[in-house]
Amino acid sequence: MIRVVVADDQPLVRMGLRTLIETEDGVQLAGEAADGREALALIRSTKPDVVFLDIRMPLMDGLEVLRRVSADPACADVRVVMLTTFDLDEYVFEALRTGASGFLVKDSDPADLLRAVHVVADGGSLLSPSVTRRVIDRFASGASARPVPHLDRLTEREREIMRHVASGASNDEIAAVLVISPATVRTHVSRAMVKLGARDRAQLVVFAVQSGLT
C-alpha cells in the first residue's frame, strides 16, 4: 500500500487529489494539510511514501518544508513531488536541487497524477523528457556554474550520458544515439547517481546544469 500526503492551501486541489487517490487500488491517503507547518508535522508523524507538496503555501512555503524533510534522516524514504501552477514556477529548479523527486502542474491529467504516485514510490523521478527540457530552458541560463563534489569520479562515458540526460533525452533516445542498449544507459545513469550522491534522476539533471556539463 502506497501512503500519500496531500499538502495544498486550495481546498479544491486537495479534494481533487483526495478523490483521485481514493479511487486507485493500492494507494491510500495518509492525510491532508492546508499550510506548510501542518504539512511538515503531518509528514514527520506519518512518514508517507509520497507527498504532493504545493510550492506556495501560508505559514511555511513548500520549499522550506522540502528542505526540512530532506534534511531529516527519519524522512529519508519520503518522496516529494512539488505542485506548481501551469507556468513554470521560478522555484522549481531550486526544488529539484533541494531533493524533490519531480513536479507536476496542478491541472495535470488524472492519469499523470496517479502515474506519478507509482513512479516516485518505486524510486523513480518524475522528470519526463519534455518536462526536463522546459526546466533546463527556463532555468539553466540563469544558473551559474558551480563545483559539483566528486564530478571527477565520473568516467567519460558517464559524463556523456549525463549530458544527454540533462538535455531531456530518455534512456531509449540516449541508447539510440550512442548505439548501446537502454539497459547499459540505465547502468551508467545509476553509477553516475551513486558517485555524485544524487538522490534521483532529477538531481542528476540539476548537477549537470550546475557543473556546466550542459
Image (cartoon, grey):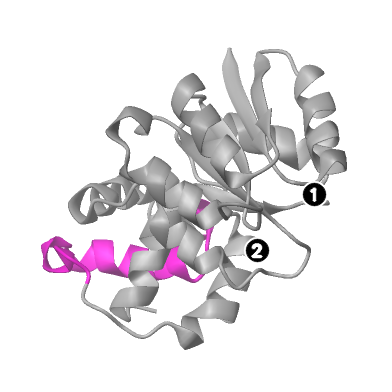
Q: Is residue 55 visible?
A: yes
Q: Are marks 2 and 1 in contact (CB under 8 Å)?
A: no
For disc 2, the marked residue is 130
Where 182 sits versus 122, above or below?
Answer: below
Residue 76 coordinates in the image, percent (x, y): 34, 33
Task: For marks 2 and 1, give the one nearer the viewer.
Answer: 1
Q: CA distance from mark 2 to mark 1?
A: 14 Å
Where 191 sits versus 196, above or below?
Answer: above
Queried whether the magenta region covers residue 161, the answer comes back as yes
Amino acid at the residue labelled 1 = Ser
SS at mark 1 in the image: loop
Closer to us: 211 or 69 = 69
Quadrant for the C terminus in the image: bottom left
Closer to us: 152 or 210 = 210
Q: Is residue 187 left or right of residue 214?
A: left
Image quadrant assignment for residue 157: bottom left
| Image point (67%, 16%), residue name | 28
Pointer 2 or 1: first along the chain: 1
For disc 1, the marked residue is 108
| Image point (22%, 56%), residue name | 196
Where 89 sits versus 22, above or below?
Answer: below
* Residue extent of the magenta highlight: 148-173
Residue 50 coordinates in the image, percent (x, y): 55, 31
Quadrant for the N terminus in the image: top right
